[in-house]
């Protein structure tokens, strides 16, 4: 039996809140975001999988959030070395 991920990341917590508050089902979000199955939405909420950056735009639109803010969060958490290398070139506000 797999243990549940009890250490949610900042991105997972943020995604969970977005998913819970957008008023859509997991299936609707999955379809609008280009995911084949809605179980990935549950996995995003728990932090068991990372949000694929290729789906970030459509996911952001589906859950009505700013894609730039979400991209910055994902880069900072998923790829800290990349974030450190590029942050000086971005408006990090």
Image (cartoon, rainbow, N blue to C red):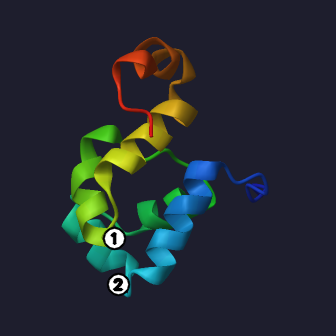
Residue at numbered disc 1: 63
- Name the foreground residue: 43 vs 19: 19
Q: Which of the numbered marks, if any, corresponds to residue 9?
A: none
Q: Quadrant of residue 17?
A: bottom right
Q: Are marks 2 and 1 in contact (CB under 8 Å)?
A: yes
x 77%, y 51%: residue: 7
The quarter of the rendered structure image containing the N terminus is bottom right
Q: Is residue 69 above or below residue 81?
A: below
Nearer to the camera, 89 or 3: 89
Quadrant where the C terminus is found in the figure: top left
The residue sitting at 51% across, 25% down in the picture is 79
Residue beneath the point at 35% across and 26% down: 90
- Look at the numbered disc 2 and give the secondary structure of its residue: loop
Answer whether residue 36 is visible to the viewer in this image: no
* Nearest to the observer: residue 52 or residue 11: 11
Q: Which residue is nearer to you in this view: 39 or 45?
A: 45
**Which numbered disc, 2 or 1, marks the residue closer to the eye?**
1
Query: Within 10 Å of the Cα at label 1, are there few (<14), some (14-19), or many (20+) other Cα atoms?
Result: many
Q: Earlier in the sequence, mark 2 or mark 1?
A: 2
**Structural distance between the alpha carbons of marks 2 and 1:** 8 Å
Residue with the mark numbered 2: 24
Image height check: is 75 above or below 13? Answer: above
């Amino acid at each position: 039996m797999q243990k549940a991920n009890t250490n949610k990341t900042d991105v997972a917590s943020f995604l969970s809140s977005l998913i819970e508050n957008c008023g859509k089902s997991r299936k609707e979000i999955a379809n609008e975001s280009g995911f084949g199955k809605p179980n990935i939405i549950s996995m995003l909420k728990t932090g068991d999988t990372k949000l694929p950056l290729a789906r970030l735009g459509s996911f952001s639109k589906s859950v009505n959030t700013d894609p730039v803010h979400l991209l910055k969060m994902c880069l900072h958490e998923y790829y800290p070395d990349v974030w450190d290398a590029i942050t000086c070139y971005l408006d990090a506000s």
